[in-house]
Image (cartoon, rainbow, N blue to C red):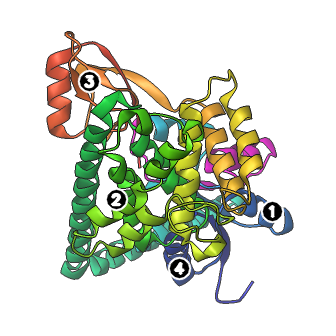
Amino acid sequence: MSDNYKYTAIVADDSEDIRRLVKRALECEGVMCDTVPDGLAAKERMDAQAYDIVISDLRMPRMHGHKLLVDMLESGSAVPFVVITGVTDPRVIRDLYTRGAADVLVKPFNFTVMALRMRHLLDQRRLATTGASHENISRQLESTTAVLQRQLSEVATSFESTIADLSRQREELESGYLGSVRVLANLMEQVGQSSRSHTVRVEKTAAAIAQRVDYPASELLNLKLAALLHEIGAFGMPDGIRLKPPWELDPEERKHFERYPEIGATVLYELKNGAAMVELVEDHAENFNGTGFPAKKLGRNVSLGARILRIADGCDTFLMHIHEADKMDALEAYLLQESGKKFDPVLVPHASDYFDELLRGDDMTFELPANQLYEGLTLAENIFDARGRFLAREGAELTATLVQRIGTLLRAKLVRVSASPAS
């Protein structure tokens, strides 16, 4: 370790931007920092090298933060484990402290303040293990407090406040835009009584796979919009064609069916600045081996986003039309069969991991009385009133207006929700 650094840390987060910003802030405070994109990589590094502190996100590919924390505790490690998470549910945070987390940082947070807290935590642990006197501890606390106060004053500038406001406004605009398109997509799916929420599930699946393959964050909104609108070209198609599994269509029906990506692209090209999203809609049915439609493009001549949409749409369509008791086993066989044919073989393991977590993983939902719901929760089921009228869709994030409406109409009726955003 360099003389410029007093401690070492390892940071595990699937966001490259967060890893970079945490590393820079920690090293400014004398903490040399290694970064990795997931829990499994962190564990491999920790087997080879000792660290003074571990900082980890919760949701990551391959191995999530909960698993990494439990493995460290079971091994008897005394290294402090700090969690960074976007989940604000107090029950989740309480559970993390109960499991043994040294600290929990809720996103978004100030990276400079975070680094000061980590340095303070490390200094306190070193003082405790070296048997420092009460006077030394008091002096160290006073010194650290003075540094915190000075640096907090420096970072609390109007510029940072303005940037935070602009970032929040952009997130709110994007969230509202996506919400409006989800409503449109769900309305389209009601025609002919087709299976509800297919497009919303494809959006969620595509976003999850994109995160696992480091898809550019700047392009994620277009990917989500394309997932929600990928079937818009089939809107006017006869139900006898639109509602059949593609593999049951006769040749004439198939010929008509295979026009829908081009029809959708033609409709959507009227949108201003929508070319990148429309290209994804037009190419989402192209197969990796060149047998897809409408243009029979081959392999990586199709963009990564369209290849992600192909596997997300294909898997959800498959799950909608099978009746096997163990859907995951059937899906794994399907993915293996179509790897290198319909689907990019590089994406197949990521899709399999996602659906394995979804279909076999722990249920992260819980129930609350309707009059105790609060903003930020996500509905885990469709909601109907006492007369059977539809109120809100599965996957909708609760707003203040929606919370008030559901609470007023359903009162103490239990509603299944999740603390995690649908997208």
Q: Measure the C-alpha gap from mark 4 to mark 1.
A: 26 Å
Q: Please state which amino acid type lies under the numbered disc 1.
A: Glu
Mark 3 sits on what residue? Answer: 372
Mark 4 sits on what residue? Answer: 29
Q: Measure the C-alpha gap from mark 3 to mark 2.
A: 42 Å
Q: Quadrant of residue 1?
A: bottom right
Q: Nearer the viewer, residue 60 or 202?
A: 202
Taking the spot 65% from the left edge, 83% from the top edge, the residue there is 5
Reply above or below: 299 against 176.
Answer: below
Q: Measure the C-alpha gap from mark 2 to mark 1.
A: 47 Å
Q: Residue furthest right?
A: 48
Q: Position of residue 220 (x, y in %)?
A: 43, 65
Q: Badge 4: few (under 14), some or many (20 or more) residues near its Cα, within 10 Å?
A: some
Callout 4 secondary element = loop
Mark 1 sits on what residue? Answer: 44
Q: Is residue 69 magenta?
A: yes
Mark 2 sits on what residue? Answer: 264
Q: Please state which amino acid type lies under the numbered disc 4.
A: Glu
Q: Nearer the viewer, mark 4 or mark 1?
A: 1
Q: Quadrant of residue 296?
A: bottom right
Q: Position of residue 114 (x, y in %)?
A: 45, 67
Q: Which residues are magenta?
A: 62-90
Taking the spot 54% from the left edge, 50% from the top edge, the residue there is 312
Mark 4 or mark 2, earlier in chain: 4
Reply above or below: 269 against 396.
Answer: below
